[in-house]
Amino acid sequence: MFREHLSLWAVYVFVSPDMDQNQAGAVAGSVEDLLGLKNDVRTERKQLVLGLDA
């Protein structure tokens, strides 16, 4: 039942855009290990970052 419950949720972990690719990959791996869930988003994927004045 625990696994079925987890499938109802999406978990997002945000890191600083200044973080180096190796560090971001390490965070992704740690979160996968901690939660026991596979990362469905490639860690090298760039995201849109808006400034406060946007």
Image (cartoon, rainbow, N blue to C red):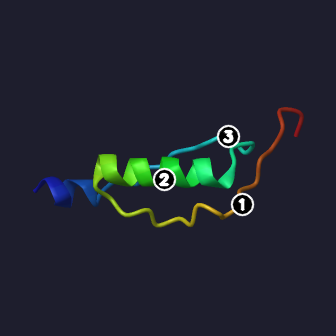
Q: Earlier in the sequence, mark 3 or mark 2?
A: 3
x and y, in percent, of residue 36 in the image: 28, 55
Which residue is pictured at 40% across the width and 54% down the height?
Answer: 10
Which residue is pictured at 51% across the width and 50% down the height?
Answer: 26
x and y, in percent, of residue 22 in the image: 61, 53
**Residue placed most toward the observer, 31 or 23:** 23
Give the spatial CA distance, label 3 vs label 2. 13 Å
Specify the amino acid type for callout 1. Lys
Which residue is pictured at 18% across the width and 60% down the height?
Answer: 4
* Quadrant in which the N terminus appears: bottom left
Give the spatial CA distance, label 1 vs label 2. 14 Å
Mark 3, other Cα within 10 Å: few <14 / some 14–19 / many ≥20: few
User: Which residue carries the number 1 mark?
Assistant: 46
Mark 2, other Cα within 10 Å: few <14 / some 14–19 / many ≥20: many
- Mark 1 in CB contact with mark 2 (< 8 angstroms): no
Specify the amino acid type for callout 3. Ser
Q: Earlier in the sequence, mark 1 or mark 2?
A: 2
Is 54 left or right of 14, judged from the image as shown? right
Which residue is pictured at 51% across the width and 45% down the height?
Answer: 13
Is 10 left or right of 35, judged from the image as shown? right
x and y, in percent, of residue 54 in the image: 88, 40
Is 39 left or right of 46, judged from the image as shown? left
The image quadrant that residue 47 belongs to is: bottom right
Residue 28 has which mark?
2
